[in-house]
Amino acid sequence: MSYPLYDFSETVVLITGAGQGIGFATAREFARFGATVYLNDILSERASRATGELIKQGYDAFAAPGDIADPEQADWIFHHIDEHHGRIDVLVNNAGVEPVSSIFDHSLEDWQRALNTNLTGAFLCTQKAALRMREQGKGVIINIASIAGKSQPLYLRSAYAASKAGLVGFTKEAAREFAPYGIRVNAIAPGVIVTPMTEHLRDDPQQMARWRAEIPLGRLGQPQEVAALCLWLASDAASYVTGVAWHVDGGKNMA
Ligand SMILES: NC(=O)c1ccc[n+]([C@@H]2O[C@H](COP(=O)([O-])OP(=O)(O)OC[C@H]3O[C@@H](n4cnc5c(N)ncnc54)[C@H](O)[C@@H]3O)[C@@H](O)[C@H]2O)c1
């Protein structure tokens, strides 16, 4: 895949949940165009392994393990970035979990885990990043939501959909509030992307056939195709774009 040429040198980017999937692809693409990338993951081994892969390829990458839904751990991540780089230019709130359950017997624990990770974690990181970006007079925040929270119920994912719909609303509020400080905030609502999160779906031929039939481009998305929009949104090419939730779903939702 080839993109327009970006220059993210002198740019510090934090991606949450970057140990695999969309987060890792996003970290790799930012690094490829010169950014210093911090890869967060709740699983520290996963964060270290992913970071090691980028370092091996000659990129400027740092592991920032921790649970972003835990205020103290989120604090530590930003403190670590302050100490080493003293700035943050781009935050990608990507960490997410997707409990699958009927509402009839949804556990409160799973409900809260989804809300805490997908929404509260994004709020905590946004608050910390925006305080620093306000001082800098510039910054970009990208929230990885989902079609589930914007246009389309998925079925048996009520906590996930509620958290992602909340994230879309939060994106617009943040975009409105931060605009005077030169901070742009957008969301991305991916459709079905080939990552470990969707393995269970891809293992089911009937479900897969149904999904494919409903996607005008006729295939699932790749993590790099979400990363590509992150890069554009973070670049000066998108300097007049804020407060929008963008579908990356092969045309499934055209509104
Ligand atoms: N894959 C898809 O089809 C799809 C579609 C729409 C939206 N999304 C969203 O994109 C994002 C990435 O999805 P993915 O498919 O790459 O998922 P994934 O499960 O492959 O990766 C998510 C990563 O986030 C980490 N994580 C979970 N909770 C965390 C926490 N509290 N703190 C830090 N890290 C945490 C996990 O350990 C994992 O490495 C998620 O927010 C997901 O909801 C994915």
Image (cartoon, grey):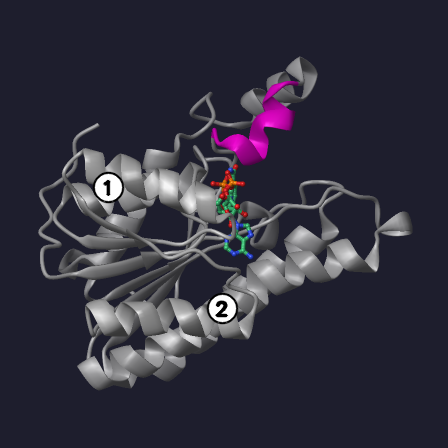
Identify the residue at image location x=53%, y=74%. Answer: 71
Q: Which residue is mark 1?
A: 29
- The circle drawn on residue 124 is none
Q: Give the prevailing secondary structure in the magenta stretch.
A: helix
Q: Position of residue 228 (x, y in %)?
A: 28, 42
Q: Position of residue 175 (x, y in %)?
A: 38, 74
Q: Give the camera-side residue of 117 and 150.
A: 117
Q: Is residue 55 above or below residue 162?
A: above
Q: Which residue is mark 2?
A: 73
Inspect the image, locate mark 2, and give the three-letter code of the amino acid beneath it. Answer: Gln
Q: Give the camera-side residue of 254 and 68.
A: 68
Magenta includes 209? no
First-in-chain label (2 vs 1):
1
Q: Is residue 200 above or below residue 243?
A: above
31 displayed left or right of 227: left
190 displayed left or right of 234: right
* Magenta region, residue range: 194-203
Q: Is the CB of the residue bearing disc 2 within 8 angstroms of ligand 1?
A: yes
Inspect the image, locate mark 1, and give the three-letter code of the amino acid beneath it. Answer: Glu
How many residues crowd around disc 1 within 10 Å: few (fewer than 14), some, or many (20 or more)?
some
Quadrant of the frame with the N terminus: top left
Q: Position of residue 51 (x, y in %)?
A: 31, 43
> SS class of the residue under badge 2?
helix
Q: Give the camera-side residue of 95 and 74.
A: 74
